Amino acid sequence: MLLAGARMQISFLKDLATLRSPQSPISFISYLHSQNRLVDFINRGDTIPTRKEYSDYLSWAAQYVQDRGVKVAYGETVIALGERNSRTIEVHTTVLSTGEHVVRLAKNLIISPGGSPRIPRPLTATWTQGRVIHSSTYLTSVKPLLDSLHSRNPRCCPLRIAVIGSGQSAAEVVIDLHSRLASIPVAGEKAHTLDMIIRKGSLKPSDDSPFVNETFNPETTSAYFGLSSSSSRRRIRLEHADANYGVVNPRTLESLYEITYDQKLDEGIRRRTGISTPSTKPMFTILNYSEILSAENGQKSGVSHAEALPHEPPEPITLVLQQTLTREVYEKSYNAILCATGYERRSWLRLLAMSNIGKHFDLDGSTQDCEVEIEAGFHQRAVDDNSTDGERPANTSNSGASTPATSQGTSDLPSSECQAKSTKKLYISRAYQLLPKTQHKQEELQVRIYLQGVVEETHGLSDTLLSVVGIRAGEVAEDLCAHFASDAKGARSARM
Protein backbone atom coordinates (compact mmCIF):
# COMPACT_ATOMS: atom_id res chain seq x y z
CA MET A 1 0.00 0.00 0.00
CA LEU A 2 1.24 3.46 -0.88
CA LEU A 3 0.60 4.94 2.54
CA ALA A 4 2.51 8.08 3.45
CA GLY A 5 6.04 7.21 4.58
CA ALA A 6 5.63 3.47 3.95
CA ARG A 7 8.86 1.72 3.01
CA MET A 8 9.70 -1.30 0.94
CA GLN A 9 10.95 -4.34 2.82
CA ILE A 10 13.81 -5.29 0.51
CA SER A 11 16.99 -3.68 -0.73
CA PHE A 12 16.77 -1.44 -3.80
CA LEU A 13 19.22 -3.84 -5.48
CA LYS A 14 16.43 -6.42 -5.75
CA ASP A 15 14.85 -4.45 -8.55
CA LEU A 16 13.62 -5.49 -11.99
CA ALA A 17 17.04 -6.15 -13.46
CA THR A 18 20.16 -5.73 -11.27
CA LEU A 19 20.52 -9.34 -10.08
CA ARG A 20 20.32 -10.57 -13.67
CA SER A 21 22.17 -7.73 -15.39
CA PRO A 22 23.80 -5.01 -13.23
CA GLN A 23 24.46 -2.93 -16.35
CA SER A 24 20.78 -2.90 -17.31
CA PRO A 25 19.31 0.48 -18.31
CA ILE A 26 16.19 -0.24 -16.22
CA SER A 27 17.86 -0.88 -12.86
CA PHE A 28 16.90 1.20 -9.83
CA ILE A 29 20.31 2.90 -9.95
CA SER A 30 19.71 3.83 -13.59
CA TYR A 31 16.37 5.29 -12.57
CA LEU A 32 17.98 7.37 -9.81
CA HIS A 33 20.67 8.58 -12.19
CA SER A 34 18.11 9.56 -14.82
CA GLN A 35 16.20 11.56 -12.20
CA ASN A 36 19.36 13.24 -10.85
CA ARG A 37 18.81 11.75 -7.37
CA LEU A 38 21.54 9.12 -7.19
CA VAL A 39 23.81 11.12 -4.86
CA ASP A 40 20.85 12.21 -2.73
CA PHE A 41 19.71 8.59 -2.36
CA ILE A 42 23.22 7.62 -1.28
CA ASN A 43 23.18 10.43 1.28
CA ARG A 44 20.05 8.90 2.85
CA GLY A 45 22.26 6.16 4.20
CA ASP A 46 19.50 3.57 3.74
CA THR A 47 19.21 0.81 1.14
CA ILE A 48 15.42 0.57 1.58
CA PRO A 49 13.47 2.97 -0.65
CA THR A 50 10.02 4.29 0.17
CA ARG A 51 7.12 2.67 -1.61
CA LYS A 52 6.32 5.99 -3.24
CA GLU A 53 9.75 6.09 -4.86
CA TYR A 54 9.69 2.41 -5.83
CA SER A 55 6.27 2.86 -7.40
CA ASP A 56 7.65 5.75 -9.43
CA TYR A 57 10.59 3.55 -10.46
CA LEU A 58 8.22 0.88 -11.77
CA SER A 59 6.26 3.52 -13.69
CA TRP A 60 9.52 4.88 -15.16
CA ALA A 61 10.66 1.39 -16.21
CA ALA A 62 7.29 0.67 -17.83
CA GLN A 63 7.49 3.88 -19.82
CA TYR A 64 11.09 3.07 -20.80
CA VAL A 65 10.17 -0.23 -22.47
CA GLN A 66 7.03 1.24 -24.07
CA ASP A 67 9.12 3.98 -25.63
CA ARG A 68 11.18 1.20 -27.24
CA GLY A 69 8.29 -0.57 -28.91
CA VAL A 70 6.78 -2.81 -26.22
CA LYS A 71 2.99 -2.57 -26.41
CA VAL A 72 1.20 -2.42 -23.07
CA ALA A 73 -2.60 -2.47 -22.81
CA TYR A 74 -3.70 -0.87 -19.54
CA GLY A 75 -7.25 -0.83 -18.26
CA GLU A 76 -8.26 -4.22 -19.63
CA THR A 77 -9.37 -7.36 -17.86
CA VAL A 78 -8.86 -10.87 -19.26
CA ILE A 79 -12.23 -12.60 -19.45
CA ALA A 80 -11.41 -15.80 -21.35
CA LEU A 81 -8.79 -17.89 -23.11
CA GLY A 82 -9.36 -20.15 -26.09
CA GLU A 83 -7.39 -22.59 -28.23
CA ARG A 84 -7.68 -21.64 -31.91
CA ASN A 85 -5.34 -24.49 -32.90
CA SER A 86 -2.43 -26.37 -31.34
CA ARG A 87 -0.07 -23.46 -32.06
CA THR A 88 -2.31 -20.47 -31.32
CA ILE A 89 -4.22 -19.21 -28.27
CA GLU A 90 -6.89 -16.54 -28.23
CA VAL A 91 -6.79 -14.06 -25.34
CA HIS A 92 -10.13 -12.31 -24.82
CA THR A 93 -10.21 -9.04 -22.87
CA THR A 94 -12.66 -6.28 -22.06
CA VAL A 95 -11.66 -2.60 -22.08
CA LEU A 96 -12.94 -1.37 -18.72
CA SER A 97 -13.63 2.20 -19.83
CA THR A 98 -15.66 1.32 -22.93
CA GLY A 99 -16.72 -2.32 -22.59
CA GLU A 100 -15.07 -3.09 -25.94
CA HIS A 101 -14.25 -6.76 -26.52
CA VAL A 102 -10.70 -7.36 -27.76
CA VAL A 103 -9.22 -10.64 -29.05
CA ARG A 104 -5.46 -11.15 -29.34
CA LEU A 105 -3.62 -14.17 -30.75
CA ALA A 106 -0.57 -15.62 -29.03
CA LYS A 107 1.91 -18.40 -29.75
CA ASN A 108 3.08 -18.36 -26.14
CA LEU A 109 1.43 -17.10 -22.97
CA ILE A 110 2.82 -15.91 -19.64
CA ILE A 111 0.20 -15.72 -16.88
CA SER A 112 1.09 -13.46 -13.95
CA PRO A 113 -2.27 -12.60 -12.38
CA GLY A 114 -1.26 -11.51 -8.90
CA GLY A 115 -3.59 -12.25 -6.01
CA SER A 116 -7.32 -11.83 -5.41
CA PRO A 117 -8.56 -10.56 -2.03
CA ARG A 118 -9.20 -13.29 0.50
CA ILE A 119 -12.12 -12.47 2.78
CA PRO A 120 -12.80 -14.53 5.92
CA ARG A 121 -15.63 -16.93 5.16
CA PRO A 122 -18.05 -15.51 7.77
CA LEU A 123 -17.75 -12.09 6.13
CA THR A 124 -18.22 -13.05 2.48
CA ALA A 125 -21.96 -12.34 2.59
CA THR A 126 -21.42 -8.79 3.89
CA TRP A 127 -18.38 -7.95 1.72
CA THR A 128 -20.51 -6.42 -1.04
CA GLN A 129 -22.29 -4.07 1.39
CA GLY A 130 -19.48 -1.50 1.18
CA ARG A 131 -18.54 -1.50 4.86
CA VAL A 132 -16.31 -4.57 4.69
CA ILE A 133 -13.25 -3.78 2.59
CA HIS A 134 -9.99 -5.56 1.85
CA SER A 135 -6.58 -4.00 2.32
CA SER A 136 -5.99 -4.28 -1.45
CA THR A 137 -8.51 -1.44 -1.97
CA TYR A 138 -7.84 0.39 1.29
CA LEU A 139 -6.26 3.48 -0.24
CA THR A 140 -9.17 4.15 -2.59
CA SER A 141 -11.91 3.03 -0.20
CA VAL A 142 -11.05 4.34 3.25
CA LYS A 143 -11.75 8.05 2.73
CA PRO A 144 -15.16 7.55 1.03
CA LEU A 145 -16.02 5.01 3.74
CA LEU A 146 -15.16 7.31 6.66
CA ASP A 147 -16.76 10.32 4.95
CA SER A 148 -19.97 8.32 4.51
CA LEU A 149 -20.01 7.16 8.13
CA HIS A 150 -19.29 10.68 9.38
CA SER A 151 -21.91 12.36 7.17
CA ARG A 152 -24.57 9.97 8.41
CA ASN A 153 -23.57 10.52 12.01
CA PRO A 154 -24.81 14.07 12.82
CA ARG A 155 -24.67 13.42 16.56
CA CYS A 156 -20.96 12.65 16.28
CA CYS A 157 -21.34 9.29 18.02
CA PRO A 158 -18.09 7.31 18.36
CA LEU A 159 -17.32 5.04 15.41
CA ARG A 160 -16.32 1.41 15.92
CA ILE A 161 -13.87 -0.01 13.38
CA ALA A 162 -12.25 -3.46 13.28
CA VAL A 163 -9.10 -4.52 11.45
CA ILE A 164 -8.73 -8.26 10.89
CA GLY A 165 -5.22 -9.63 10.41
CA SER A 166 -1.82 -9.82 12.08
CA GLY A 167 0.58 -9.08 9.23
CA GLN A 168 2.29 -6.04 7.76
CA SER A 169 -0.77 -4.74 5.92
CA ALA A 170 -2.95 -5.05 9.02
CA ALA A 171 -0.46 -3.10 11.14
CA GLU A 172 -0.13 -0.36 8.54
CA VAL A 173 -3.91 -0.07 8.21
CA VAL A 174 -4.26 0.24 12.00
CA ILE A 175 -1.66 3.03 12.18
CA ASP A 176 -3.27 4.93 9.30
CA LEU A 177 -6.81 4.47 10.63
CA HIS A 178 -5.73 5.62 14.08
CA SER A 179 -4.58 8.89 12.55
CA ARG A 180 -7.67 9.31 10.36
CA LEU A 181 -10.13 8.59 13.18
CA ALA A 182 -8.37 11.13 15.41
CA SER A 183 -9.44 13.84 12.96
CA ILE A 184 -13.14 12.91 13.15
CA PRO A 185 -14.90 14.78 15.99
CA VAL A 186 -16.71 12.89 18.75
CA ALA A 187 -19.43 14.22 21.05
CA GLY A 188 -18.89 13.85 24.78
CA GLU A 189 -16.02 12.07 26.46
CA LYS A 190 -16.26 8.79 24.61
CA ALA A 191 -13.71 7.92 21.88
CA HIS A 192 -13.77 6.06 18.63
CA THR A 193 -12.99 2.35 18.94
CA LEU A 194 -10.32 0.65 16.84
CA ASP A 195 -9.94 -3.10 17.39
CA MET A 196 -7.35 -5.38 15.82
CA ILE A 197 -8.61 -8.98 15.69
CA ILE A 198 -5.90 -11.65 15.49
CA ARG A 199 -5.68 -15.40 15.99
CA LYS A 200 -2.24 -15.22 17.54
CA GLY A 201 -1.33 -14.25 21.08
CA SER A 202 0.68 -11.26 19.87
CA LEU A 203 2.04 -9.57 16.77
CA LYS A 204 5.30 -11.12 15.56
CA PRO A 205 8.28 -9.39 13.89
CA SER A 206 9.36 -10.43 10.43
CA ASP A 207 12.70 -12.22 10.30
CA ASP A 208 14.96 -10.45 7.82
CA SER A 209 18.27 -11.63 9.23
CA PRO A 210 20.99 -12.46 6.66
CA PHE A 211 20.86 -16.24 6.94
CA VAL A 212 17.07 -16.36 6.75
CA ASN A 213 17.14 -14.01 3.75
CA GLU A 214 19.12 -16.63 1.85
CA THR A 215 15.76 -18.39 1.52
CA PHE A 216 14.97 -15.79 -1.14
CA ASN A 217 18.23 -16.20 -3.08
CA PRO A 218 17.71 -17.14 -6.74
CA GLU A 219 19.77 -20.32 -6.39
CA THR A 220 17.51 -21.46 -3.56
CA THR A 221 14.70 -21.79 -6.11
CA SER A 222 16.57 -24.56 -7.93
CA ALA A 223 17.40 -26.35 -4.69
CA TYR A 224 13.77 -26.12 -3.58
CA PHE A 225 12.40 -27.30 -6.91
CA GLY A 226 14.80 -30.24 -6.96
CA LEU A 227 13.67 -31.71 -3.64
CA SER A 228 12.29 -35.20 -4.01
CA SER A 229 9.18 -34.84 -1.87
CA SER A 230 6.41 -32.34 -1.32
CA SER A 231 6.70 -32.86 2.43
CA SER A 232 10.25 -31.48 2.34
CA ARG A 233 9.07 -28.40 0.46
CA ARG A 234 6.17 -27.96 2.83
CA ARG A 235 8.47 -28.18 5.84
CA ILE A 236 10.75 -25.47 4.41
CA ARG A 237 7.81 -23.19 3.69
CA LEU A 238 6.49 -23.55 7.21
CA GLU A 239 9.95 -23.10 8.70
CA HIS A 240 10.46 -19.75 6.96
CA ALA A 241 6.87 -18.50 6.96
CA ASP A 242 7.78 -15.90 9.59
CA ALA A 243 10.01 -14.22 7.02
CA ASN A 244 6.99 -13.25 4.92
CA TYR A 245 3.53 -14.19 6.21
CA GLY A 246 1.59 -12.99 9.23
CA VAL A 247 4.50 -10.91 10.50
CA VAL A 248 5.28 -7.21 10.81
CA ASN A 249 8.40 -5.20 10.07
CA PRO A 250 10.11 -4.30 13.39
CA ARG A 251 9.98 -0.58 12.62
CA THR A 252 6.23 -0.79 12.01
CA LEU A 253 5.82 -2.74 15.25
CA GLU A 254 7.61 0.00 17.13
CA SER A 255 5.27 2.63 15.68
CA LEU A 256 2.25 0.54 16.61
CA TYR A 257 3.51 -0.04 20.12
CA GLU A 258 4.00 3.71 20.56
CA ILE A 259 0.25 4.07 19.99
CA THR A 260 -0.57 1.59 22.74
CA TYR A 261 1.99 3.12 25.10
CA ASP A 262 0.73 6.67 24.54
CA GLN A 263 -2.78 5.40 25.25
CA LYS A 264 -1.65 3.91 28.54
CA LEU A 265 0.15 7.14 29.37
CA ASP A 266 -3.02 9.18 28.87
CA GLU A 267 -4.98 6.75 31.07
CA GLY A 268 -2.32 6.94 33.77
CA ILE A 269 -2.33 10.74 33.79
CA ARG A 270 -6.13 10.77 34.00
CA ARG A 271 -6.15 8.39 36.98
CA ARG A 272 -3.40 10.27 38.79
CA THR A 273 -4.76 13.77 38.30
CA GLY A 274 -8.45 13.07 38.02
CA ILE A 275 -8.50 15.36 35.00
CA SER A 276 -9.86 14.03 31.74
CA THR A 277 -8.15 15.80 28.86
CA PRO A 278 -10.40 16.09 25.79
CA SER A 279 -9.01 13.94 22.95
CA THR A 280 -10.30 12.51 19.69
CA LYS A 281 -7.69 9.76 19.62
CA PRO A 282 -9.43 6.38 19.19
CA MET A 283 -9.23 3.66 21.82
CA PHE A 284 -7.04 0.93 20.30
CA THR A 285 -7.29 -2.69 21.46
CA ILE A 286 -5.76 -5.93 20.18
CA LEU A 287 -8.20 -8.81 20.53
CA ASN A 288 -5.78 -11.73 20.51
CA TYR A 289 -6.54 -15.45 20.35
CA SER A 290 -9.78 -14.50 18.61
CA GLU A 291 -11.65 -16.52 16.01
CA ILE A 292 -14.58 -15.17 13.98
CA LEU A 293 -17.44 -17.63 14.12
CA SER A 294 -20.07 -15.65 12.24
CA ALA A 295 -21.06 -12.19 11.06
CA GLU A 296 -24.46 -10.58 10.72
CA ASN A 297 -25.29 -7.41 8.86
CA GLY A 298 -27.46 -5.44 11.26
CA GLN A 299 -29.38 -3.54 8.60
CA LYS A 300 -32.99 -2.89 9.35
CA SER A 301 -35.23 -5.45 7.74
CA GLY A 302 -36.22 -4.58 4.18
CA VAL A 303 -33.98 -1.49 3.98
CA SER A 304 -30.80 -1.60 1.93
CA HIS A 305 -27.68 0.35 2.82
CA ALA A 306 -28.33 2.69 -0.10
CA GLU A 307 -31.97 3.26 0.90
CA ALA A 308 -31.29 4.13 4.54
CA LEU A 309 -31.93 7.71 5.62
CA PRO A 310 -29.01 9.98 4.67
CA HIS A 311 -28.42 11.16 8.26
CA GLU A 312 -29.07 7.86 9.95
CA PRO A 313 -25.96 5.85 10.92
CA PRO A 314 -25.99 2.44 9.24
CA GLU A 315 -26.78 -0.49 11.47
CA PRO A 316 -23.61 -2.16 12.72
CA ILE A 317 -22.08 -5.40 11.54
CA THR A 318 -22.09 -7.82 14.45
CA LEU A 319 -19.29 -10.35 14.77
CA VAL A 320 -19.57 -13.45 16.91
CA LEU A 321 -16.08 -14.15 18.25
CA GLN A 322 -14.54 -16.92 20.28
CA GLN A 323 -11.56 -16.54 22.58
CA THR A 324 -9.66 -19.66 21.59
CA LEU A 325 -7.93 -20.17 24.95
CA THR A 326 -10.94 -19.81 27.26
CA ARG A 327 -13.52 -20.85 24.59
CA GLU A 328 -15.62 -17.83 25.62
CA VAL A 329 -18.03 -16.72 22.89
CA TYR A 330 -18.96 -13.04 22.69
CA GLU A 331 -20.24 -10.40 20.27
CA LYS A 332 -18.70 -7.17 18.99
CA SER A 333 -20.42 -4.66 16.72
CA TYR A 334 -18.66 -2.42 14.20
CA ASN A 335 -19.55 0.33 11.76
CA ALA A 336 -16.92 -0.95 9.33
CA ILE A 337 -14.45 -3.83 9.03
CA LEU A 338 -11.09 -3.78 7.25
CA CYS A 339 -9.71 -7.19 6.21
CA ALA A 340 -5.94 -7.53 5.86
CA THR A 341 -6.25 -11.27 5.40
CA GLY A 342 -4.04 -12.07 2.45
CA TYR A 343 -4.73 -13.24 -1.07
CA GLU A 344 -5.72 -16.33 -2.98
CA ARG A 345 -3.95 -17.03 -6.26
CA ARG A 346 -6.26 -19.34 -8.22
CA SER A 347 -7.73 -17.01 -10.85
CA TRP A 348 -5.40 -18.45 -13.51
CA LEU A 349 -6.68 -21.93 -12.70
CA ARG A 350 -10.30 -20.94 -13.20
CA LEU A 351 -9.37 -19.17 -16.44
CA LEU A 352 -7.78 -22.32 -17.87
CA ALA A 353 -10.42 -24.69 -16.51
CA MET A 354 -13.26 -22.78 -18.19
CA SER A 355 -11.52 -22.78 -21.59
CA ASN A 356 -10.95 -25.46 -24.21
CA ILE A 357 -7.26 -25.24 -23.31
CA GLY A 358 -8.02 -26.92 -19.99
CA LYS A 359 -8.39 -30.35 -21.61
CA HIS A 360 -4.61 -30.43 -22.18
CA PHE A 361 -4.10 -30.23 -18.42
CA ASP A 362 -7.05 -32.38 -17.37
CA LEU A 363 -8.95 -29.28 -16.25
CA ASP A 364 -12.62 -28.56 -16.85
CA GLY A 365 -15.58 -26.82 -15.27
CA SER A 366 -15.66 -29.30 -12.40
CA THR A 367 -12.17 -28.27 -11.29
CA GLN A 368 -13.57 -25.75 -8.80
CA ASP A 369 -15.00 -28.70 -6.88
CA CYS A 370 -11.62 -30.46 -6.80
CA GLU A 371 -8.43 -30.02 -4.88
CA VAL A 372 -5.66 -29.27 -7.38
CA GLU A 373 -2.04 -30.11 -6.68
CA ILE A 374 0.96 -28.64 -8.49
CA GLU A 375 3.94 -30.96 -8.89
CA ALA A 376 7.44 -30.36 -10.14
CA GLY A 377 7.61 -31.75 -13.66
CA PHE A 378 11.00 -33.10 -14.65
CA HIS A 379 10.06 -33.73 -18.30
CA GLN A 380 9.26 -31.44 -21.16
CA ARG A 381 5.82 -33.01 -21.28
CA ALA A 382 4.16 -34.28 -18.13
CA VAL A 383 3.51 -38.00 -17.90
CA ASP A 384 -0.01 -39.35 -17.56
CA ASP A 385 -0.94 -40.59 -14.12
CA ASN A 386 -1.20 -44.18 -15.46
CA SER A 387 2.02 -44.07 -17.44
CA THR A 388 4.93 -46.30 -16.41
CA ASP A 389 7.48 -44.83 -18.80
CA GLY A 390 10.18 -42.51 -17.57
CA GLU A 391 10.70 -40.86 -14.22
CA ARG A 392 7.56 -39.88 -12.36
CA PRO A 393 7.46 -36.51 -10.64
CA ALA A 394 7.81 -37.38 -6.99
CA ASN A 395 6.70 -34.27 -5.18
CA THR A 396 3.19 -33.06 -4.55
CA SER A 397 1.87 -30.00 -2.86
CA ASN A 398 -1.37 -28.22 -2.20
CA SER A 399 -2.02 -25.91 -5.09
CA GLY A 400 -4.13 -23.21 -3.65
CA ALA A 401 -1.11 -21.18 -4.68
CA SER A 402 -2.32 -18.67 -2.18
CA THR A 403 -0.83 -16.14 0.15
CA PRO A 404 -1.41 -17.64 3.58
CA ALA A 405 -3.96 -15.58 5.45
CA THR A 406 -2.47 -13.53 8.24
CA SER A 407 -5.55 -14.01 10.35
CA GLN A 408 -9.15 -15.17 10.08
CA GLY A 409 -8.65 -16.49 6.55
CA THR A 410 -8.52 -20.02 5.33
CA SER A 411 -5.14 -21.64 5.74
CA ASP A 412 -2.96 -22.49 2.79
CA LEU A 413 -2.68 -26.00 4.19
CA PRO A 414 -5.33 -28.51 3.11
CA SER A 415 -8.24 -28.88 5.48
CA SER A 416 -10.08 -32.12 6.13
CA GLU A 417 -12.89 -30.77 3.97
CA CYS A 418 -10.49 -30.22 1.07
CA GLN A 419 -8.89 -33.61 1.52
CA ALA A 420 -12.29 -35.22 1.01
CA LYS A 421 -12.53 -33.74 -2.48
CA SER A 422 -11.17 -35.44 -5.57
CA THR A 423 -7.68 -34.37 -6.60
CA LYS A 424 -6.22 -33.31 -9.93
CA LYS A 425 -2.53 -32.81 -10.62
CA LEU A 426 -0.73 -30.20 -12.66
CA TYR A 427 2.95 -30.27 -13.60
CA ILE A 428 5.29 -27.33 -13.97
CA SER A 429 8.88 -27.16 -15.17
CA ARG A 430 11.81 -25.47 -13.43
CA ALA A 431 11.48 -22.68 -16.04
CA TYR A 432 7.87 -22.07 -14.88
CA GLN A 433 6.19 -23.73 -17.88
CA LEU A 434 2.89 -25.45 -17.20
CA LEU A 435 3.30 -28.88 -18.79
CA PRO A 436 0.44 -30.46 -20.77
CA LYS A 437 -0.36 -34.09 -20.16
CA THR A 438 1.05 -36.54 -22.75
CA GLN A 439 -1.35 -36.91 -25.68
CA HIS A 440 -1.50 -38.17 -29.22
CA LYS A 441 0.99 -36.20 -31.28
CA GLN A 442 -1.67 -34.63 -33.49
CA GLU A 443 -3.51 -33.29 -30.42
CA GLU A 444 -0.45 -32.05 -28.53
CA LEU A 445 -0.58 -28.39 -27.45
CA GLN A 446 2.38 -26.57 -28.98
CA VAL A 447 1.66 -23.26 -27.26
CA ARG A 448 3.78 -22.81 -24.15
CA ILE A 449 2.10 -21.43 -21.05
CA TYR A 450 4.18 -20.03 -18.20
CA LEU A 451 3.09 -19.13 -14.67
CA GLN A 452 4.57 -16.40 -12.49
CA GLY A 453 3.78 -15.59 -8.89
CA VAL A 454 1.43 -18.54 -8.27
CA VAL A 455 3.74 -21.55 -7.86
CA GLU A 456 5.16 -21.09 -4.39
CA GLU A 457 4.60 -24.81 -3.77
CA THR A 458 7.22 -25.85 -6.33
CA HIS A 459 9.50 -22.79 -6.54
CA GLY A 460 9.61 -21.55 -2.96
CA LEU A 461 8.60 -18.56 -0.86
CA SER A 462 10.24 -16.04 -3.16
CA ASP A 463 7.82 -16.80 -6.03
CA THR A 464 5.31 -14.12 -4.99
CA LEU A 465 7.99 -11.57 -4.07
CA LEU A 466 10.25 -9.10 -5.86
CA SER A 467 13.38 -11.00 -4.79
CA VAL A 468 13.61 -13.14 -7.93
CA VAL A 469 11.47 -11.19 -10.42
CA GLY A 470 14.43 -10.20 -12.63
CA ILE A 471 16.07 -13.63 -12.52
CA ARG A 472 12.75 -15.36 -13.19
CA ALA A 473 12.00 -13.18 -16.20
CA GLY A 474 15.41 -14.09 -17.62
CA GLU A 475 14.80 -17.80 -17.06
CA VAL A 476 11.45 -17.67 -18.86
CA ALA A 477 12.96 -15.70 -21.76
CA GLU A 478 15.88 -18.15 -22.05
CA ASP A 479 13.49 -21.10 -22.03
CA LEU A 480 11.38 -19.55 -24.78
CA CYS A 481 14.45 -18.82 -26.88
CA ALA A 482 15.73 -22.38 -26.41
CA HIS A 483 12.38 -23.72 -27.63
CA PHE A 484 12.36 -21.32 -30.59
CA ALA A 485 15.79 -22.61 -31.61
CA SER A 486 14.72 -26.23 -31.13
CA ASP A 487 11.50 -25.73 -33.12
CA ALA A 488 13.39 -24.01 -35.93
CA LYS A 489 15.92 -26.84 -36.07
CA GLY A 490 13.12 -29.41 -36.15
CA ALA A 491 11.41 -27.54 -38.99
CA ARG A 492 14.61 -27.49 -41.03
CA SER A 493 15.13 -31.20 -40.46
CA ALA A 494 11.56 -31.94 -41.57
CA ARG A 495 12.14 -30.12 -44.87
CA MET A 496 15.32 -32.03 -45.64
Image (cartoon, rainbow, N blue to C red):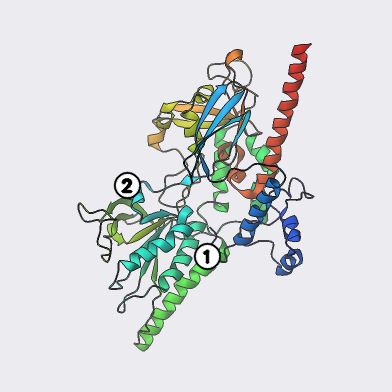
List x then y, in percent, for residue 408: 40, 51
Tag shown at residue 51: none
Residue 228 shown left or right of residue 321 in the figure:
right
Q: Nearer the viewer, residue 244 or 30?
A: 30
Tag 2: amino acid: Ala
Residue 444 place in picture, x, y as percent: 59, 18
Residue 443: quarter of image: top right
Residue 208 picture location, percent across and down: 62, 56
**Image quadrant for the C terminus?**
top right
Q: Earlier in the sequence, mark 1 or mark 2?
A: 2
Q: Toward the viewer: 482 or 276?
A: 482
Say which of 34 and 380 sits in front.
34
x 74%, y 17%: residue: 491
Residue at mark 1: 253
CA distance for labels 1 and 2: 32 Å
Q: Is residue 266 left or right of residue 349?
A: left
Residue count near mark 2 (Cα–Cα under 10 Å), binned few <14, some 14–19, many ≥20: some
In the rendering, at what x and y percent does residue 196 appear? 41, 61
Residue drawn where x is 60% and y is 61% of the image = 52
- Classify 439 as above or below 447: above
Camera sees residue 341:
yes
**Viewer-closest of 469 and 96:** 96
Judging by the rendered image, the residue that carries numbered circle 2 is 125
